[in-house]
Amino acid sequence: MISLSDYNHPHSPHGLAVSVKDLGLTYTTSIDKKPTLKARLRTLGRGKKYTRVVKALSGVNIDVHYGAVLGVIGSNGAGKSSLMRVISGIVPPTEGRVEVYGSVSTLLALGVGFNPAMTGRDNVYLGGLAAGMSREDIDKNFDAIADFSELGDAIDAPMRTYSSGMYARLAFSVAAVVEPDILIIDEALSTGDAKFKEKSLNRIKELRSSDRALILVSHALATIEDVCNEVVWLNKGTLMARGNPSEVIAQYRTFVNARKSASSDEDV
Amino acid sequence: MDKPVVVYEPFRAGMPPMRDYLRTLWGRRTFIAEFSRSELREKNYGTVFGQLWLVLNPLLLSGVYFLLIYVIGGSSDANRFGHLTATLFLFYLIANSLTGGVKAITSGQRLILNTSFPRVMLPISATVIALFKFVPTLIVFAAIHLLIGLPYSWKMLWAIPIFMIALLMGLGMSILISCVNVYFRDVSSMLPYLTRSLLYLSPILYEASSVSDEIKSLEIANPLFYLLDSWSRVVVYAEAPTTFGLLHSLIWALVIFIVGTYFFLSRERDFAVRL
């Protein structure tokens, strides 16, 4: 488990930030929507287990170096979010090994805030503390977070009153202001209005530096091409290609278009 | 080359490396405090009336049972009213810990799916919240104690270890049930019946001495029976607890805590997938 307070972990520029070796991830889900004792008792003694096995990732090898901005692309269900969850230590891998050489800040699909009844401020503090920041760290960054999110007084309103755009703005601000060694952003750029989108894109460009690694998951291929210096393409849990952004994106486009005629991926 | 800060590998059944785990847990202690505080604030306990409610609620509770047993039942013994309130308040420390703990993991879904942290922080917070709610009731009981003129003695210091045992028991139950509820979601709907049964099976509405020996031998299976009996002896009658009572509750608390924590820690890496 990483804490953001392991801040001053020494790492050489261009050193390894994340190393993923032969990663496999299998989910076993029950077919029943909710696991209950009743359902378990009902299936007891029937010998058959009502579960479904989903292979989310298999044989994935990726090295991310400091200074890299890695774009992750792929269709829905390709395993992008699963990969991010494994790298950030939320879900343990089923096979293989993941090594992380620094503090990680994640902005995954769900965003910040786990209790909608609490205010934006409380949620920011709780999220930060859970991630291992100290209260002083958050105090120091809080104004910058609130400013960046442009929420104004709404920061002290319960998060259930937020619009989805406000939600996304706050989530992005938390992840982007904190300045971790490794920043993972999972499809969080796609919400928010044009102005905020541009602002967050600029922030990501600012965050690019030789002693930081960024991993962006997005369907916005133009953005990925613009921001990243390396792209990996995942399909059904396996790595299809990695390398130069324009080449990989071109391959991905041909692949998608081969299966489905006209498609526009250009919604940021 | 640098050494990795952290390595994620497939986990086999068993505990995570304990030293690292405890170190991260200790590093997150401010989260537990802040979480409990925001949770209480969200339920309006930050306001004057909210805090008043924390005191009023146990008073009303004991009032209801007072009515039931001593007005309708026709008994008028001050000691027994003291016993009722003292044991009821301690019982609620454990019951609140259980009801808070049952959904600790399942309602922390967003946080669990987004952040890597020792999951056991969530049920611990539930017990801390129960503790915050217990403190005002202790003050209410002190006032009752004074008003109805119950005895005092140095032996009342036994209340401290007994309270610690109760807290450990509440914590263990909270950790255990939060984990069980991940796998069997209907446990949370059965919980009210469980706590209600515990309430009636424990010496709260009656005293342990009024129970026949046969039933008493069955009550060994009730983790709370001798705990509440010892608590009553100490804080109501200012007597020392029996060694048996003390050991019985200590062993139960340790067993629940150890089993619950083992179960929880060996499973917690699986939670993100199960939610």
Image (spheres, rainbow, N blue to C red):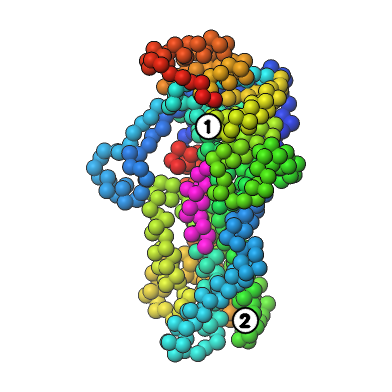
Q: In the rendered view, does A158 fall on the left or right side of B70?
A: right
Residue A88 appears in the rendering: no
Q: Amino acid at mark 2?
A: His
x, y (%) of residue B84? 52, 78
Give how far apart the Cα atoms at labels 2 and 1 are.
Answer: 55 Å
On residue A85, the disc is: 1
Q: Secondary structure at mark 2?
A: helix
Q: In the rendered view, does B15 fall on the left or right side of A235?
A: right
What is the span of residues highlighted in magenta in the rendered image?
B96-110
Asked which quadrant contains residue B199, the reply is bottom left
Frontmost residue, A225 versus B67: A225
Q: Is B44 placed above or below B74 here?
A: above
> At 58% across and 34% down in the image, what residue appears?
A192
Task: Confirm whether the magenta stretch covers residue B103.
Answer: yes
Q: Chain of mark 1?
A: A
Q: Which residue is mark 2?
A: B145
Q: Amino acid at mark 1?
A: Arg
Q: Main secondary structure of the magenta part?
A: helix
How many other residues sit within 10 Å of disc 1, few (<14), some (14-19) or many (≥20)?
Answer: many
